[in-house]
Image: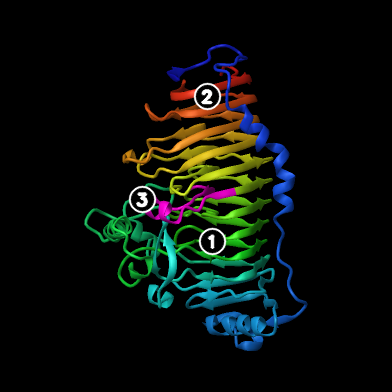
Amino acid sequence: MLKYTHHVAAFFLFCTMASSSLRADEATIGWHSVDEIVAKISAPRFADREFDVTDYGADGKGKKNSQVAINKAIDACHDAGGGRVLVPAGEYRVDGPIRLRSNVNLHLAAESTLLFSTQPSDYLPNVFTRFEGTELMNYSPPIYAFGESNIGLTGKGTIDGQASHDNWWKWKGRWSGSSKSDWKKGDPDQSTALEKLLSQAAEGVAPEERVYGEKSLLRSNFVQPYRCQNVLIEGITVKNSPMWCLHPVLCENVVVRGVTVDSHGPNNDGCNPESCRYVLIEDCTFDTGDDCIAIKSGRNSDGRRLNTPSEFYVIRNCRMRDGHGGVVLGSEMSGGVRNIFVEDCEMDSPNLERAIRLKSNSMRGGYLENLFVRNVKVGQVSDAVLRVNLHYADETGDYPPVVRNIYIENLTSEKSKYAFYFRGLEDHPIESITIRNCTFAGAAKPSIIEHVKELSLEEVMMPLK
C-alpha cells in the first residue's frame, strides 16, 4: 500500500511503482470491448411523418404559451404511430413541462428556442423523479419522459431554462461558483428538504410517499428520460438549467451526440446518466457550473435499494471547458459504476478544476471500477489532472466503497496544481491504478498519494517547469 506525497523533480519518470495483480481484469474488459459496446448502442429510428407544432397553435413569436400546443403535437404523433414533431425557427414560450412519448422525435429547427417558465407552480403536478440520486415525487423536469421507448430530442435549436439567481438557482443556498449569488445566511434554501428526503429514504419510506414539489425548494433537472429505452439527444444547445442539464435515469441504449451545454448555475452538470446501461456520449461540448459529465447510480440507501449500476459507457470526441470535472464518476454512486471508456477528448479551461475525477466516501458505498481513459489532451486545470478522493464531502459511514482498476494512457496535460491527487481509505485503499505513456507538464505542487494499493507508472513524464 502506498501512502506518501510524491513529487518528481527530474525531467521524466519511468518506473513501475507496484506490479499489478489485477491485470487479468484488463484482459476481460478493456479497449478491445469498445466496438462490442458501441455495436449494442443504436439511435432510435422514427417514422416518416411530420407534425408541425404551429399547426396545433404554437406561437413562434413568444407572445403566448406554447406548452399545450407542443404536447398536443407530440400526442398526435404518438397516436399516429410515431414520427417527427417539428418546432420551426422562432421563440416559443413554454409555461410548463413537455412530455415526450414513445416513437416521437421532438426536433428543434435551427434558430428555434424553447423558453421555459421559471414559475415553479407551472411544473405541477408532481412526477416521479430523482433529486441527487434519491427518488421522490417532485416538480416535473421541463422535458420529461417516463417508461417510454424510442424517444428523441434533436435539431440545431436551443432549450433555455431561463434559470438564474433570481429564481431556481437561489434555492441552492450558498454557492461559490462563477455566477454571482446574493444568497445570505438565513435565506431559505434546499437543505431542510434534502435532509428530510435522505432521512425518509434511510427509513424505508416508499418513494411515492416522499412528496415534495410546492415550497420544498428542491429544483428539477432539465431533461430527464426516466426508465426509458432507446433515447436520442442530438444537436441541441442547452442553456440556464435549474439544476442537472441532461439526466437519463434507469435507461438503456442512450445516445447523446453533438450537444452543446452552456449553463453555469449551481449544480449545472452537463450530462449525468444515472443507473443506465449502454450509453454513448460523443462530439459534445460542455461549459458548465459543475461537472461536465458525471456518471451516477443513486445515493446511499436509495442507491443500494435499487442496486442498479451505471455500466458500459463510451465517451469520445468531447470538449470540456469550465466545470468542476471533465469526466467524473460519483459521488452519488451507491449502486455502482463500471466499465466506462473515455477517449479522444479535449479538456482545457482555467475554470476547469479537474480532468478525470472519481469521488466517493464510506457513506455512499458502492463501487467504481474498470475506468479506461486514453488519448486525452488537457490544456490546463486549476486542481488535479487525475483525482480520486474517497473522503468526498467529509462524510463517513459503514459502507466503504470499492475503487479499482483505473487505466490511463496517452494523456497529456500542460498546466495544473497537481498531476495526481489520490486519497483512499486506510482500511479500504484504492486498488490498481495504471498510468501509461502520459505527460504531466507544469504541475505546481507535489502529487498527493495516500492509501493506494498497486500504482503502476509506465513511461510517465513530468517535465520541470
Q: Residues within 10 Å of mark 3 (few under 14, many from 20)?
A: some
Labelled disc at residue 448: none
Q: Is residue 290 left or right of residue 233?
A: left
Contact, mark 3 vs mark 1 (Cβ under 8 Å): no
Residue type of the residue flagged with mark 2:
Ala
Contact, mark 2 vs mark 3 (Cβ under 8 Å): no
Q: Which segment did they paint magenta?
A: 291-311
Contact, mark 2 vs mark 1 (Cβ under 8 Å): no
Disc nearer the start of the sequence (2/1): 1
How far apart are labels 2 and 3 at the CA level? 28 Å
Residue type of the residue flagged with mark 3:
Trp
Identify the residue position indicated by label 2 in the image: 443
Q: Position of residue 208 (x, y in %)?
A: 37, 70
Disc nearer the start of the sequence (2/3): 3
Residue 400: name its quadrant: top left
Residue type of the residue flagged with mark 1:
Lys
198, 345: nearer the viewer: 198
Q: Residue at x 31, y 39 (%)?
A: 396
Asked if residue 82 is among those painted magenta in the image, a careful observer would answer: no
Labelled disc at residue 239: 1
How far apart are labels 2 and 1 at the CA level? 33 Å
Q: Residue furthest left?
A: 186
Quadrant location of the N terminus in the rendered image: top left
